Image (cartoon, rainbow, N blue to C red):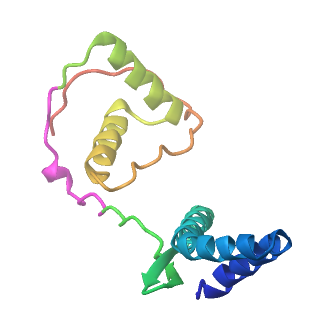
Amino acid sequence: MDLSPYLEALRRDLAAAAAPGGPDVTRAAELLTGSLEASARLCLLEALSDATAEITTRLHSASVEVRLRGREADLVVTDVPEFTAPTPPPPPAGDAADLARVTLRLPEHLKSQVERAASVEGISVNAWLVRAIGGALYSGPGMPPTPPGPPRPPRPGRGRRITGFAQS
């Protein structure tokens, strides 16, 4: 974008405003115009930069910037690829033989919250904890956390607490 037509229009306007003042005022306006050109060019570039910044904030898939080449300003539009987060790998499938037993000590208030959350979803505390741990592991840095599933109605016959250990 050539800024010269805008600067020439400013020069003409200043000369027209000075003309009624006589030859001395016209000469002073011509001298003033020469020294104001650099300042006016800088002001135009700042206005273009502010405009491109505002346009860029309103665009979702492109960026606009001003590039200076000599005395010309070029407006450049660059497409910005949308970021898609990589899908987390599925948890490894395992047999019943691949299961490990872990003793977990929880504060009583946390344990009751886990039990309540599991019963609301209609699953066991163990299944709820396995899913929570898997979600924490598979949504590492740079990956969005896995959203919780919709609440499931409690299944009939669920909600009773059974403790103990069985071995086959």
Q: Is residue 118 left or right of residue 44?
A: left
- Quadrant of the drawing holding the C terminus: top left
Q: In the rendered structure, which segment of residues is drawn in magenta?
A: 89-103
Counting from the top left corner in percent of width and height, residue 15 is at 75, 77
Asked if residue 98 is among those painted magenta in the image, a careful observer would answer: yes
Counting from the top left corner in percent of width and height, residue 115 is at 40, 23
- Quadrant of the drawing holding the N terminus: bottom right
Asked if residue 131 is among those painted magenta in the image, a careful observer would answer: no
Counting from the top left corner in percent of width and height, residue 98 is at 14, 52
Placement of 9 over or under 17, stated as above or below: below
Q: In the displayed orientation, state which residue is furthest to the top.
A: 108
Quadrant in the picture for residue 16: bottom right
Q: Is residue 143 left or right of residue 13?
A: left
Placement of 63 over or under 99, stated as above or below: below
Seen at 46% across and 76% down, the residue is 81
Counting from the top left corner in percent of width and height, residue 160 is at 44, 21
Question: How many tags in the picture?
Answer: 0
Q: Is residue 111 left or right of residue 123?
A: left
